Amino acid sequence: MHNKEVKKETSLIHKGYVSKNHHDSLTIPLYQTSTFAFSSAEEGERRFAGEESGNIYSRLGNPTVSLLEERMMELESGKGALAFGSGMAAVSAVLLHVIKSGDHIMCSRGIYGCTFGLLEMFEEKFNISHSFHAMETEEEIEAAIRPNTACLYIETPINPTMEIVDLSLVIKIAKKHGIKVIVDNTFSSPFLQNPLEMGADYVLHSATKYINGHGDVIAGLLVGNDADDMMKLRMTVQKDVGGIISPFDAWLLIRGLKTLHVRMDRHTQNAGTVLSYLKNEPFVENIYYPFDESHPQYHIAKKQMKAGGGLISFTIRGGKEAAQLFLNSLSLIKIAVSLGDAETLIQHPATMTHSVIPEMEREKMGITHSLLRVSVGLEHPEDLINDLKQAFIKVQDQMPTTNVN
Ligand SMILES: *Cc1c(COP(=O)(O)O)cnc(C)c1O
């Protein structure tokens, strides 16, 4: 048996699993079952009464899912973790848990498109308001807090503009007011940033992205800093709204987690190479990457993230026409939303991930028609650069009037 002192990289491979309890299987079996058979009526009664631990029904718990939750809790240094059928199921579950009708949600300047859609629905149906803030100074944050503010909902780096929110500043102020802090940590992955260690109350991930890492699962994970509170969430919102993960998807995520640290290192390394290339490309106007020294919040990024990660956003000269022509000229790099996969993916946020956000709001968030977001994958970086290069040449050839000097 390994002791408690092992590093996270080791825990992700070994924690919580004893092969002799599973016919000596090296990896955890996939418990693809909806329900569990009780050995007697009394046993069933005791389990329902909570007097005896044990499985009941897979919406309430499943051994394969539990191992994923245990490893995720370790990785984010939490006290409880829950797996969901999508990132949005995790987002909606934590929000339903912390808010009630009449409350206000204070958000970072940019949030994921569907989270925005959910907040609009909350406003319309349940009188739950929301507002967006740069959250750059103490004064500004203090002034934005309302008597009915129930939680701060933060994404950092912000999708897709890569702006950084200073987590320790925001958390300090929220704590003073007794307001919960929820962080969507999808972009960093649990390997590059751990908001709970900085005092946040909840951290969530679209596990579809870096955690799975292989582009074949949609899933979400939520980790909290209070075991009783997370148990309550499990037995209320998760059980009764029901956005659970399937055992098979949990099994795939357990496999993905085992290589997360190795993949994040390579994503970051490849992103560094692609970044250097883009910085010298005349068709590129602005580049947004947290660990680029020209990033306005470079020092905050350095303080709270272990590395810059695999996502780069940039603006291309020539607006929407050039952006679309550029995407259509790529061959190895795939035009796709999502991120964190082995394959390098590129997308146009204004017409894709963020198209549901009204144009005015979108422009305020900095999501113009010139903006492109690349999720740098695990291919050899020279091949990626060659593909980008030939696509820029095609744009140059077809839009010769775009001044690149
Ligand atoms: C993808 C994503 C989500 C939503 O996750 P799904 O797994 O697609 O439901 C939420 N937040 C961020 C930052 C994302 O990138």
Image (spheres, helix red, strand yellow):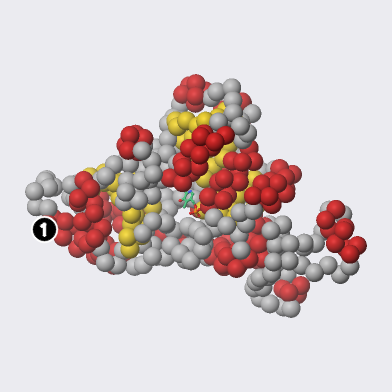
Q: In which quarter of the image is the N terminus?
A: bottom right
| Residue furthest out toward the left | 401
Q: Pinpoint residue 228: horizontal percent, then vertical percent.
A: 74, 44
Q: Pinpoint residue 390: horizontal percent, then vertical percent.
A: 19, 63
Q: Name the residue under label 1.
A: 397
User: Please, is residue 58 above or below residue 94 in the view?
Assistant: below
Q: Pinpoint residue 90: horizontal percent, then vertical percent.
A: 58, 49
Residue 250 quadrant: bottom right
In the figure, is residue 289 to the left or right of 170?
A: left
In the figure, is residue 329 to the left or right of 183?
A: left
Residue 333 quadrant: bottom left
Q: Quadrant of the C terminus?
A: top left
Residue at left 38%, top 49%? 353
Instruction: Work out whether residue 72 can be spotted.
Output: no
Residue 43 quadrant: bottom right
Q: Pinpoint residue 135: horizontal percent, then vertical percent.
A: 46, 30
User: Please, is residue 158 above or below residue 263 in the view?
Assistant: above
Mark 1 residue type = Asp
